[in-house]
Amino acid sequence: MEINISPYCSAGHSLFYTNEALGIKSKINNDSLLKAMKNCYQFENVNMYQHGVMVHEAYLNLINLLDSGLILEGLPEELIDIYQSNKDDLFDIPCMKFYQTYHDCGKPYCREVDEQGRQHFPDHANVSYRMFKEAFPDEEAEQMLILHDMDFHTLKVEQLKELAESEYGFSLFLTAWAELIANSQMFGGFDSTSFKIKKKKLIKCFKLFRK
């Protein structure tokens, strides 16, 4: 099934960025992406490349537990059943590693700092898609996964039905859990209010994958 991609995101930023508009003076390739990711920080002492590696490691740990019928304390037990019912729809590990490692590769190119010194990355999923596609034009599955990486975190459940039913749906959904786990230190741990709010949002999406 083809998923329609709007040329504009909800924040009003164009998906079709030019290198000039992003301040990029040379062609994007793997070396330039890695350099930019390693010089831009997700949070203190963790750069964008390290963050991507952390997400992939959290993903591997999560699926290993779920394969054994186990779950991390603080996560819903129903995730075990959801996983067992949908695991055959996941992309293979090399694809997931590539996607998860590079999922925020566009953040160095859209980073902004506000008057309070807080950093923001407006429309970063679209920018990451744009940068990754230029560096790896033949990796179509990873491109689409990166483009829709934020959807399960930000869209309402009723807006996610088409995506959930697509070939990308369950891979994105399980990655959203891995991202939540990897980012938990930034939120203050599993017991923090922020973590619980984000977890509740993902739990609402269970109904899209119940079989």
Image (spheres, rainbow, N blue to C red):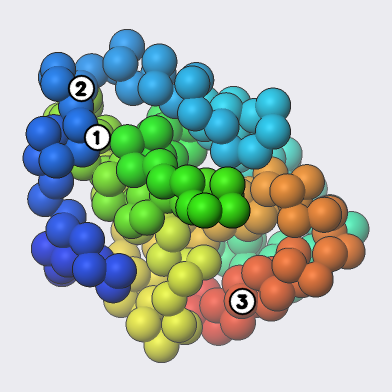
Foreground mark, 1 or 3, reads: 1
**Rounded to the nearest whole Å, what is the CA distance between mark 1 and mark 2?**
7 Å
Q: Is mark 2 on a helix, strand or loop?
A: loop
Please tell me which residue is depicted at 34% across the width and 43% down the height of the picture.
Answer: 110
| Residues at circles 1 and 2 in contact by the CB criterion of under 8 Å | yes
* Residue at the disc numbered 2: 28
| Residues at circles 3 and 2 in contact by the CB criterion of under 8 Å | no
Q: In which quarter of the image is the N terminus?
A: bottom left
Q: Which amino acid does label 1 sit on?
A: Met
Please tell me which residue is depicted at 84% across the width and 64% down the height of the picture.
Answer: 192
- Disc 1 crowd rating (10 Å Cα; few below 14, some 14-19, many 20+) is many
Please tell me which residue is depicted at 22% across the width and 68% down the height of the picture.
Answer: 12
The answer to whether any part of residue 53 appears in the image is no
Task: Report x, y in % for residue 38.
Answer: 50, 20
* Residue at the disc numbered 3: 201
Q: What element carries label 3?
A: helix
Q: Give the tally of numbered discs.
A: 3
Lower sequence index among marks 3 and 2: 2
Q: Which amino acid does label 2 sit on?
A: Ile
Lower sequence index among marks 1 and 3: 1
* Residue at the disc numbered 1: 131
Could you tell whether 124 is left or right of 25 in the image?
right
